[in-house]
Image (cartoon, rainbow, N blue to C red):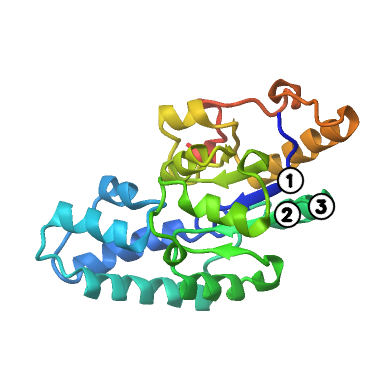
Amino acid sequence: MQKIEAVILDMDGLMIDTERFAREAWRQAASEVGYTIDEALLTRTRGRTLEDGRTILLDALGQGFPYAEVRSRRDAYVREALERGDIQAMEGLTVFLETIDSLQLKKAIATSGQGDATSRKLAALGLNDSFGTVVCGDDIENGKPAPDIFLEAARRLDAEPSQCVVLEDSDAGARAADAAGMRVIVIPELRPPAPDVVSLAWRVLPSLIEAASLLADVCEKQAENGEATTATSASPAHPVGPPEDLAPSQR
């Protein structure tokens, strides 16, 4: 195993509990103009850029779907929830960030969200100063599941892709990390990962707390063994888990 030098995190649904609010906001905004967006359609947009999401919705609902209006209403509802303090950091985020800082690992955010919305969310939760490198959906040409966003994050961190670990909650994001040649830890939020994502994942874990422990264990072993650590040397307390092994709240 290559020595771990950097950690790249997705944001929505991984660092910040925005996905539940965003999904309900999409449903509400669409219903106000006479459309229904079901769970299956919303799942297809997870982890995708704004433009990719627009294409998916228009293909499914027809070219007459007033995307711009619905998107504006959806964004307003999410912004209001953020301002009310309803949207919080995900469980274990503080512990995770403290752990990777103590391990002296480089870190970055790679989110499909737009730059202005990303800055607003990070500021609301006091995280603006926690990351010097943030790559957003409007910074790259091809969104997840293409590898572009993770390769750009690695470039900005001056890290080799093989030395990066990505944390993701979405299937599209996990596939993008794998395509970039990076190890990926999947922490599902709303539904279990697809079978191919379980297969490609380095680990599937229930929360950032377990991810912090895993990285600490692996980095410690790498320091002891001079980078000769193999993937199987990680603590058996952190196996690659199929969906049924997830905590109840993650099923």
Left or right of residue 238, residue 188 in this image: left
Q: What element carries label 3?
A: loop
Q: Which amino acid does label 3 sit on?
A: Gln
Q: How far apart are marks 3 and 1 (CA)?
A: 8 Å
Q: Is residue 131 placed above or below 20 in the rendered structure?
A: below
Whichever of callouts 3 and 1 sits on the residue coming sooner in the sequence is 1
Q: In percent of the image, x 20 and y 65: which residue is there?
A: 31
Of tags 3 and 1, the one toward the viewer is 1
Q: How far apart are marks 1 and 2 (CA)?
A: 6 Å
Left or right of residue 189, residue 29 in this image: left
Q: Residue furthest right?
A: 224
Q: Residue 104 carries which label?
A: 3
Q: Dot 3: few (<14), some (14–19), or many (≥20) neighbours within 10 Å? A: few
Q: Is mark 2 on a helix, strand or loop?
A: strand
Q: Nearer the viewer, residue 39 or 51?
A: 51
The residue that disc 1 covers is 5
Q: What residue type is labelled 2?
A: Lys
Whichever of callouts 1 and 2 sits on the residue coming sooner in the sequence is 1
Q: Is residue 164 placed above or below 22 in the rendered structure?
A: above
Contact flag, marks 1 and 2 (Cβ < 8 Å): yes
The residue that disc 2 covers is 106
